[in-house]
Amino acid sequence: MSPYTQRHGKIEQKSVPRQKMEKESKYFPYKNLDLGGSIALHYGFTPNETPEIKKVDLDHSKALLEGDFVENEGENGALLPLHVEEKISVLRTYIDRNMYSLPQPVMMYFKGPFKGSLSKKSHSYPRYGDLEIIGNPKSIAEATLIKTALAILEEYGYKNLCVEINSIGDRESISKFTRELTAYYRKNIEGLSAHGRQLLKKDVFELISLADKKSEALKEDAPKSITFLSEPSRIHFKEVLEFLEKLNIPYKINHHLVGNRKYCSETIFEIISHAEGKKHPECQTLALGVRYDGLAKKIGLKKEVSGVGISLLLKRPAREKVVAKIKRPILYFVQLGFEAKLFSLEVINILRKENVMVHQALSKDKLAGQFSVAERIETPYMILIGKKEAMEGSAIVRDMSTRSQETVPLSKLVQYVKKLGA
């Protein structure tokens, strides 16, 4: 959570007239913050100006894909707006604005579509905005993105939401999977259509998403990417699924969701809405997410930077609610241990629904690091959850000035912190 904004391409604190300092000291002033942005703030994302895709981003994209740019498509053939030049522009923005000097990870919310996309085709999917997390290679990043996106979609009235997810793993995993997949299709090349044979020469990954009746049987029996995950990638994917289960988020593994191996890595995920009241329910893709670790060095950056983001694919309402002020948090959320981390997003969601905002650093594992941040920003109160509290469904609330603390059942937490002025 940060009172920072962009100006002339840089991040800086918004100035407040001196006569208003006392009156507005309890608020973060954000201009025309939409509903999505206000929800994203609760999970730690800071509203940012949507990056403009520049010529250098397009040049990197074309070089990376060797001039052979291919649209990502959904199962119904509709074009999905997931393009490498967008992720490249996010990484460039991160470097250009010196965001690496800020506390990591950097979590950004972008309102609206990127300008200057490499694709010249019009998409059947509208673009609401993007959530991006730079500098966090851990599974909590995917969990935070998915939970935040679901919260936004639910606030707009979408129902019957389900996450479809897969993993292609790290470089080692992708290399093994590519070899096995290529060998499989070469062995069964007679079962491919003419178009399928051309795709095999071009990029074997594209055969997985090919909507081709002749190749359908081959696709179902093809090797699955999760079979070839390295041990670190297997653990990472397992943790992401544990987060989804703990948060009671419906999900299914979609083996046909593989993305583009030239810039995607680890997890790829979609949020789907299933229509009701029909003999043959239709699915609507409302969000599309991907991790892109490894992309930074491919575009010439000296240091590797972890990145993962999700694009929200829905129409904005004609009259959208805007939030003039966001109350500054008086609480800092601290968690210790994986069980507590699993529990944390649900606690934050409960507080969000009652408009209680907290500072948090879910990417951090060590207690000392979280305490030092809490002391630096001088938060009056702290919420602490460890393994014991996670199992009992409770939280410790500590007064930072007196060091006194009390264990509060989760069912009474909102009422308790509101009495403190949250």
Image (spheres, rainbow, N blue to C red):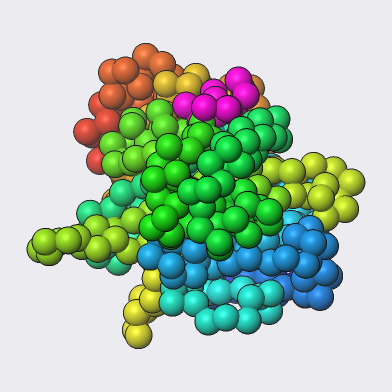
Residue situated furthest front in the rendering: 190
Residue 253 is covered by the magenta coloring: no
Please name the predominant secondary structure of the magenta segment in the image. helix
Residue 405 in the image: above or below residue 300:
above
Residue 217 appears in the figure? yes
In front: 53, or 325?
Answer: 53
Describe residue 297's horizontal placement relative to residue 34 as left or right. Answer: right
In front: 260, or 178?
Answer: 178
Describe residue 167's horizontal placement relative to residue 203 as left or right. Answer: left
Which quadrant of the structure image shows residue 22?
bottom right
Which residues make up the magenta segment? 227-238
Residue 234 is covered by the magenta coloring: yes
Please give the name of the residue rendered at 70% of the width and 50% of the height, measured from the top-left corner.
262
Which quadrant of the structure image shows residue 318?
bottom left
Please give the name of the residue rendered at 62% of the width and 36% of the height, measured from the top-left corner.
183
| Residue 400 position within the rendered picture, expressed as x and y whole percent measured from the top left | 51, 30
| Residue 30 position within the rendered picture, expressed as x and y whole percent measured from the top left | 54, 69
Residue situated furthest bottom in the rendering: 318
Please give the name of the residue rendered at 62% of the width and 24% of the height, measured from the top-left corner.
230
Residue 89 appears in the figure? no
Count the marks: how many? 0
Residue situated furthest top in the rendering: 388
Which quadrant of the structure image shows residue 72?
bottom right
Please give the name of the residue rendered at 51% of the width and 58% of the height, measured from the top-left corner.
193
| Residue 1 position within the rendered picture, expressed as x and y whole percent measured from the top left | 56, 51
In front: 223, or 308?
Answer: 223
Residue 248 in the image: above or below residue 95:
above
